[in-house]
Amino acid sequence: MLKDIVLAEGSGFCFGVKRAIDIAFDVAKKHKDGVFTLGPIIHNPQVVEKLKDLGVYPIDDIYGQNIKTLIIRAHGIPKEKFEEIKKLGIEVIDATCPFVKKAQNLAEKLASEGYQVLIIGDKEHPEVKGIFSYAGEKAVVISSDEFPILNKKIGIIQQTTQPMSKVKEIVSKIVNSHNEFEEIRIFNTLCNFTSRRLETTEKVAKQVDVMIVVGGKNSANTTQLAKLCKSIGVKTYHIEDAQEIDKEWVESAKKIGITAGASTPQWIIDEVIDKIKKFTN
Ligand code: SF4
């Protein structure tokens, strides 16, 4: 049976991830040893392995290693860590995504102007930990309109990958059901790449029998894509690479959709498409 394979538009590397990877490969060419990234440069194990082959290693801690050059990943790192690294005299190459940088800068500015900073997001996510470190003592990471009120002036920003619908819901509750604030400032720090990919994925998921979501199992935005597809009711499989595809998933489907997270390289997407074609032709 001939199958239709539909790839969601904008699948794969986003601008910030591509930029971080390009920087890392460039550094690997110029520096022969002592190059590390603090945490994996992006949430994709295959890319991290490729970089290891070129001498760029991920580390969890800056101590106990002979670090000459340290690349800061796309998600950014906490301010205190940045300062600690600089004090050690390590060459820092900052590949923090400009959208994340914008959220960090806004957090710092709002805090310095006396606002209690509210960050809508997942407090365990590295990007949020980084933004939070710039947001002053009264900052709170929130996922609803309930939070400790420590100031009459609040500034609201978001983790770049939060869904717009969730942000709108929380912001509208804060604005409409709290009257204790003198001033509320709201900034949009969401990343268009993420919302665009969610839109194109939804469009594809609504017209296929099976969705294959490609990307690191530890990637928040890939997990979000898989969750979205499942919520639409389409049979969804989240895989990291082509090897994981089971023939049974695709052989009886008439139309198969594919989407991929922001840290999934094009070569992995191509391998997935080839494997599906092999199983279904
Ligand atoms: S998803 Fe957006 S914010 Fe995150 S790295 Fe990519 S471009 Fe930057």
Image (cartoon, rainbow, N blue to C red):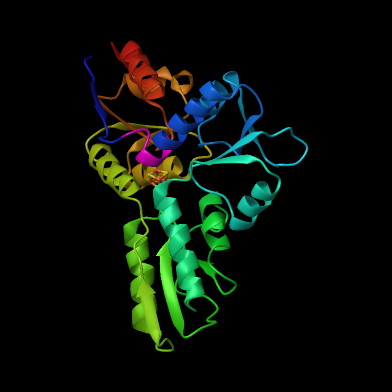
Identity of the residue drawn at 28% across and 10% down: 281
Q: Is residue 15 magenta?
A: yes
Quarter for ligand 1? Answer: top left
Q: Is residue 259 above or below residue 116?
A: above
Residue 266 part of the magenta-drawn span: no
Q: Is residue 239 above or below residue 146?
A: above
- Residue 205, x across and y down, in percent: 28, 38
Q: Is residue 174 left or right of residue 139?
A: left
Quarter where residue 156 is shown: bottom left
Image location of residue 158, percent across then percent down: 42, 61
The residue lying at 57 percent from left, 20 percent from top is: 54
Residue 119 in view in this figure: no
- Residue 267 vs residue 203, the one in the foreground: 267
The residue lying furthest to the right in this view is 64
Which residue is pictured at 21% across the width and 15% down the height? 2
Q: Nearer the viewer, residue 249 or 155?
A: 155
Lateral position of residue 59 relative to residue 131, left or right? right
89 vs 247, nearest the viewer: 89
- Placement of the N terminus among the 4 image quadrants: top left
Magenta residues, as a range?
11-17
Q: Position of residue 231 (x, y in %)?
A: 36, 48
Q: Where is residue 163? Give x, y as percent.
A: 36, 55
Answer whether residue 85 is visible to the viewer in this image. Answer: yes
Comparing 91 with 121, the one in front is 91
Please, is residue 122 above or below residue 257 in the view? below
State the residue at coordinates (30%, 42%): 197
